[in-house]
Each structure stands twice: as C-alpha cells, then as structure tokens.
Amino acid sequence: MPDPSLSEAIREAYAVAPSDVIIHHTLELRHPAFVDDDGNATAIRVVRDHQNLTARLEASAPMDSGEMVAFIAMGFELELPPVDTVPVPEITVTLDNVSRELVKHLDAAVTSQEKIEITYRPYLSNDLEGPQMDPPLTLILTEVEASIFRITGRARMLNIGKKAFPSEVYTAKRFPGLSR
C-alpha cells in the first residue's frame, strides 16, 4: 500500500532512482532535558550521510518551525514501519559512532519521566526547502541501550487505542447543565 504522506517527488525518486538525486534520511530527537550550553531547549538532528546538511523544517515542526537547521552527519540504521493495519507500528533505530554530546543529552533524559520523541524526515538533494513527507513520521523512543560506540532504541507510535474518546471530560462542575 503506498504511503499517502510522501510527496510525489520522493515517490518518483524511490521508483526511478535517478543518479543525480540523493535521498537524505534525517532524524530529530527531542526531549525537555535536551538543552544547549546557554540553557535553551535544543534538538538533536542527524543526517545519514558523510557530510552535514542544512535544510528547512516544515511549518508544523515542534521546534524551529519553517527555519533552516543543521543536521549533523552520522551513521544510523532505521527501517520505516510498514504502511499496514498493525495496531502500534514499531521500529528499531541504531545510531553509530555517537558523540559525547549526544550521550550527555541522553543521560539528562534518563532522570526524567518525559518521553524522547524522534521524528524522521526525508529530503531530496535537489529540494532542501522542506521534507518530502507531510506530516513527518514522529515516534516515541523507548528501551534505549547505549554503549561506547552505539545507541539502540525501539521507537513506536503513541498507542492511540488507549486514549479516551472524546478526550474532553464532561463534569457537572465544568458543565452545570449536566446536573439536575
């Protein structure tokens, strides 16, 4: 089943595989404990390549929306979840040759109850003005294991089956017309 969130340009790149267009796979990791040296919230952004990449984020991005941002070159493995009817898609993400800075951010996240969000965005080398997937795939990173050279984690979508519907709770205090 085709993925409707992919742009026509990247579908063509997957199908035709032109030699002059490269698909840049990027990951962004976000957590409230990820802060820079000045104490400002930051995100970890990596691209699967040998050189850094500067590309524009989508307008609906949770951080730095619509801005040109830098993705640091880093080897990583990721297999996208199938476009299928599985209840909660899950993938394994492996980051190789991790830096001390990345480990420092992950150590800060361990002490928090908040979840690490991970966003996958594909870019085409001939169009860095926005990701070729709308909306980008955002997952929750769980079960993280770190060694000196590698970080491995399982990522899954939020289990929307466990969310209350409707999400608004109707109480007599908020809605006095409910009580008799």
Image (tube, rainbow, N blue to C red):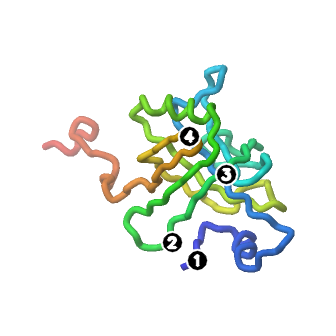
The residue shown at (56%, 38%) is 148
Pointers 3 and 4 in contact (CB under 8 A)?
Answer: no
Q: Earlier in the sequence, mark 2 or mark 1?
A: 1
User: What whole-number distance in Å separates the C-alpha atoms at marks 2 and 4?
Assistant: 24 Å
Q: Earlier in the sequence, mark 4 or mark 1?
A: 1
The Cα–Cα distance between marks 4 and 1, rounded to whole angstroms, is 28 Å
At horizontal 61% and vertical 46% (from top left) the residue drawn is 28
Q: Which residue is mark 4?
A: 30
- Upstream in the sequence, badge 3 or badge 1? 1
For image coordinates 74% across by 63% down, the residue present is 23
Determine the secondary structure under disc 3.
loop
> What residue type is disc 3 on?
Gly
Q: Reading the chain from its start, which is encountered first: label 2 or label 4?
A: 4
Residues under numbered marks 2 and 3 in contact, where contact means CB atoms less than 8 Å apart: no
- Residue closer to the observer: 14 or 6: 14
What amino acid is labelled 1 in the image?
Answer: Pro
**Residue 8 place in picture, x, y as percent:** 71, 72
Q: Is residue 171 left or right of residue 93?
A: left
Q: Is residue 57 left or right of residue 29?
A: right
Q: Position of residue 74 (x, y in %)?
A: 69, 47
Q: In which quarter of the view is residue 150 placed?
A: top right
